[in-house]
Image (cartoon, coloured by chain):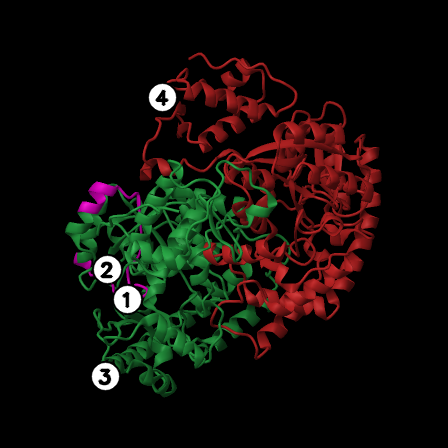
Chain colours: A red, B green
Amino acid sequence: MAIPQIHFDDHTPKVQQIVEAFARAIEQGQLAAGSKLPSVRELGAQLGVGKFTVNEALDRLRGQHLLTSRQGRGHFVAQRQTQPSSSNWVDLLPQDLLSVLRRPMLTGQGELRPGGGHLPEDWLDSEALRQAMRSVVRAPSLRVAGMGTPAGFLPLRQALQQKLQGDGLAVSVEQIITTPSTLQGLDMLMRLLARPGDTVLLDAPCYFNFHANLALHGVRVLTLPRGPDGLDFAALERLLAEERPSLYVTTSILHNPTGHSFSAAQAFGLLQLMRQYHCHIIEDDLYGDLHPNPPPRLAALAGLEQVTYLSGFSKTLSANTRVSYVVAAPQLAANLTNMKLMSGGVTSELFEQLVYRLLSEGSYARHRKRMVQRLLEAGARVEQWLRRCGCELPMGYEAGMFIWARLPAGVNGEQLAEAGLKRGMVLAPGALFGYEPGMGEFMRFNVAHCDDPRVWAAIEPLLR
Amino acid sequence: MAIPQIHFDDHTPKVQQIVEAFARAIEQGQLAAGSKLPSVRELGAQLGVGKFTVNEALDRLRGQHLLTSRQGRGHFVAQRQTQPSSSNWVDLLPQDLLSVLRRPMLTGQGELRPGGGHLPEDWLDSEALRQAMRSVVRAPSLRVAGMGTPAGFLPLRQALQQKLQGDGLAVSVEQIITTPSTLQGLDMLMRLLARPGDTVLLDAPCYFNFHANLALHGVRVLTLPRGPDGLDFAALERLLAEERPSLYVTTSILHNPTGHSFSAAQAFGLLQLMRQYHCHIIEDDLYGDLHPNPPPRLAALAGLEQVTYLSGFSKTLSANTRVSYVVAAPQLAANLTNMKLMSGGVTSELFEQLVYRLLSEGSYARHRKRMVQRLLEAGARVEQWLRRCGCELPMGYEAGMFIWARLPAGVNGEQLAEAGLKRGMVLAPGALFGYEPGMGEFMRFNVAHCDDPRVWAAIEPLLR
């Protein structure tokens, strides 16, 4: 079979260029329905790209129902306009991101977790959590029957209103809607704000679940490199003018995986361009509370008509108490409540009562202060150690949980991660955070988990 | 403005016929972009249908982006192919079902809740729940950091496997995936199994959130009346042959709102037809545990290739412990786990540990037995009372929570519900459960809430 010839340009991710070329070839009949594609290895060789890129492209094409795959038998060009039957339904989900998501990152396996996305158990204030939970369970006000209030437990939303006020974001309680996780908050916002085919802008690198979630919505994803100076405004303006993205999803403060925070000036320039080109921003602020002196949030600067704000307590309290929240313009907030009802995403009042207690009794503020300080100290040590090992840290270390490190020359992130896994150690290779070339040279390190001689002893030999 | 003339046929819901006629007129340019539609009242008069039907049709058209609405200024034909801008994004969600969902049903307001969808607080075993929660909180094994296992807490899934085995459904643990609610389970299944434009079959009447959720997925909904004999097989076969629905979503046992359970013979006939026409079934079994002697589940009869099974504990334990589960064919179960990860729908291990304890220590089984008996006794009294009041009960009362009653001649369900609300009483008028004509004559009663002289005293005067 003759596959499409592709002359890659530098502007668009290769994965996307492959997807577009194959989609065109399939639609124009150059690749006939039912015909079998070459193997992943052959495709990679013919296109001059890696296995990871080929798999990603194949999986997106499968997500668009242009290809089907049969277990162990390879990829085939799909019959067009077939009714889903129970035998091919199972193929409908883009498999691409599953491999990413299934990685040990999420399984909780591995004794040492230098690549982990959470704080270690003993860093969290589990005693305060248990204590608050005991109070909630004992309280006669605990309603067992019935659901929670659709928008979320009112006293919690009032406490969040106060907290947001402290961060410079003055909103009404009606604009605060709880969600079971920030990712589910993003998912519901995408269902409300995007249609298939819309163009959405992400940072490169960025949190892998953003890519995963956007794939569910059938949007076209563009990425722009995020460096120490934020985004390159000239490149951003070209992209906004040419590609007209309608949404930009970003983590403004202590960005995952780089740890970068938009300075006030970077934020201001960004917001001006986004406003000029009518690109709405979804601001993920899951890590802001880990910053000792956070710069202004985008939503606080530009307001909720331009920026919808997402945050939660999965990183600072516990991922198990599923309490996150969206802050949005009034009509969008109302629609989000309806989305919660229509999609079954109504949250648990029990957990919301729990977080409310921790917020209102001051133990969250105390815990946060301790955590910030402890992270700064661990971060300084881990920064030193990584530099000593020959890593380059383009963003340095400012605060928070993550350091983004370029590995010593000749060390590949994915191979390092595989070697680590054999030693019971979970690492986060750069390829998890973006499909752009060069990600393989990077690694995300969690400073809380890395501040441990056992980790140093295990990784150092692998870095040589 | 000249609106389309519609000659209604009896086969398709009027709402859908209106939507299709208007969509055609808009696409063919007979209704010009930007032009204003007549008021709801005028449209109703011109089309010869009720306000409820008009609103539903307008909202679906809005959901398809064919209409826009401006607060207080009416409905307008949308400009085609407009980019979403932050000002019109807020219109994208079909508003139709919001009115339904926002009804007092879900707000927990109202002292008396004869129309409620849950058991009263004092019917639930809240002491066992609190006790189990205290144990979970005390247990040293409680992990505060990290997420739960993506597919769900393994010991709970093992306990569910045993429970399902008792109901005649032999499955592997890998086929059981927890979800935060059955509605979210349905939502995730729809994302995996349906594409916009697919045809999905529902019962008439049926649980209002099924309609709400399907609207989110852009599928075409057909309904078939469900009576004491189940579905009319001749009508079902005609519909399967002509309309080719790919999915049928139903509550097989103690159906909400009618209380009807498919007998083994009805289930067998149904499954044969569905198999013949390749229509997959999503079986909601949220109420089966309230039946003293449940007939076989559809999934147990036909297997999981033909029937995907959904159940949970929101009705029998507490809506606040958000533990439900899907049982599916192996590949679909794997995709569902991925969908949980990609959409942020990962469940809380804490609640799953709680339900596991109640299941494994036998307190759920004891509680269930008591509840079933208590419901049977209350149901017998409420059945008598409703008949005395002049209601006709087409399904009688078999078991479970609900009685579906035709109100005495001249009493309209929605008016009755409004009058009840003024007296602090939440009722469930038939119009909540379907858009078909005639629903206005019906009302769903919750036998646990109705077994109360205060309810009788409050409703009886309204039924005359």
- The residue indicated by pointer 1 is B258
Compare marks 3 and 2 and give the one earlier in the sequence: 2
Q: Is residue B100 left or right of residue A167?
A: left
- Pointer 2 and pointer 1: residues touching (CB < 8 Å)? yes
Tell me where residue B255 appears, x and y as whole percent: 30, 63
According to the picture, the residue beneath numbered tag 2 turns out to be B226
State whether residue A63 appears in this view.
Answer: yes
Both marks 1 and 4 on one chain? no
Whole-percent x and y of residue B156? 46, 58
| Tags 1 and 3 both on a single chain | yes
Q: Residue at x 41, y 50 (%)?
A: B60
Q: Nearer the viewer, residue B179 or A446?
A: B179
Comparing labels 4 and 2, the label whose residue is closer to the camera: 2
Amino acid, disc 3: Arg
Which secondary structure, mark 4?
A: loop
Per the rendered image, the range of residues in magenta is: B238-265
Find disc 3 in the rendering and name its residue: B388
Disc 2 residue type (three-letter): Arg
* x 73%, y 64%: residue: A162
Measure the alpha-carbon separation of dots 2 and 1: 9 Å
Looking at the image, residue B318 sits to the left or right of residue B2; the answer is: right
Cβ–Cβ under 8 Å for marks 3 and 2? no
Give the percent coordinates (x, y) of residue B154: 48, 54
Q: Given the image, what chain letter belongs to the residue carrying mark 3?
A: B
Q: Residues within 10 Å of mark 1 (few under 14, many from 20)?
A: many
On screen, residue B186 above or below B132: above
Where is residue A292 shown, x and y percent of the image? 82, 53
Q: To which quarter of the image does residue A268 belong?
A: top right
Quarter that holds the N terminus of chain A: top left
Q: Amino acid at mark 4?
A: Ala
Q: Quadrant of the C terminus of chain A?
A: top right
